[in-house]
Amino acid sequence: MAEPKHPVPGAGIVVWRGDEVLLIRRGKPPYTGEWSIPGGKVEFGETVRETALRELKEETGTTARIVGLIDVIDAIGAREPGNPGDWHYVLCDFAAVWTGGEPVAADDVTEAAFFPLDEALRLTRWDQTRDVIGRARTMIAALPTP
């Protein structure tokens, strides 16, 4: 008898440096070759915030300060209405402000770079990614200036 499938928890991070947002090009499925935000699976005993910051460092070599939770999003692959998908991630996406390091692709990404908002939105294909990028920008813009 097959073991039941369960959603996999993950975390993503939308990092802003001034007027630019950090994107990575995925090096493995799902969406190999697509531009997205840094992120990955939650490890046992790790909080979703810790996951987001760890994945950021592993994938891009950069650091950031989380300023808030944008949303929790279900990513379900190859799903027919009324049926489970062939993969299911529950993603906690955070808005963050860059604190250091220049992006260098590492771990499971092939490219990492900061892009102006308009270009980032053109590069990302998934509506949910474009949405969290825009919502993170709004959150960052609302922060008090130091």
Image (cartoon, rainbow, N blue to C red):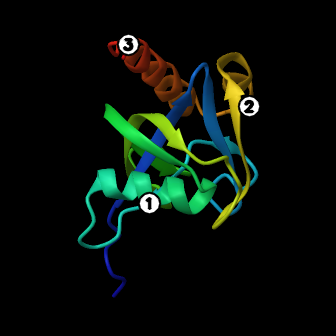
Q: Which image quadrant: the C terminus?
A: top left
N-terminal of the two: label 2 or label 1?
A: 1
N-terminal of the two: label 3 or label 2?
A: 2
Q: Secondary structure at mark 2?
A: helix
Q: Amino acid at mark 2?
A: Leu
Depth check: give the residue in front, 58 or 34. 58
Q: Residue at x 34, y 70 (%)?
A: 43
CA distance separating discs 2 and 1: 24 Å
Q: Residue furthest bottom?
A: 1
Q: Amino acid at mark 3?
A: Thr
Q: Nearer the viewer, mark 2 or mark 1?
A: 1
Q: Amino acid at mark 1?
A: Arg
- Could you say where residue 109 lies in the image, as x and y percent from the top left? 68, 59
- Could you say where residue 17 lies in the image, as x and y percent from the top left? 57, 29
CA distance separating discs 3 and 2: 29 Å
Label of residue 4 in the image: none
Q: Residue under label 2, please give it.
A: 123
Q: Residue under label 1, please give it.
A: 54
Q: Is residue 52 above or below residue 13?
A: below
Q: Which image quadrant: the N terminus?
A: bottom left
Q: Are marks 3 and 2 in contact (CB under 8 Å)?
A: no
Q: Residue under label 3, please give it.
A: 145
Q: Residue at x 51, y 19 (%)?
A: 134
Q: Is residue 89 visible?
A: no
Q: Is residue 45 left or right of residue 84?
A: left
Q: Is residue 95 left or right of residue 37?
A: left
Quarter occupied by residue 46: bottom left
Q: Are marks 1 and 3 in contact (CB under 8 Å)?
A: no
Depth check: give the residue in front, 31 or 60. 60
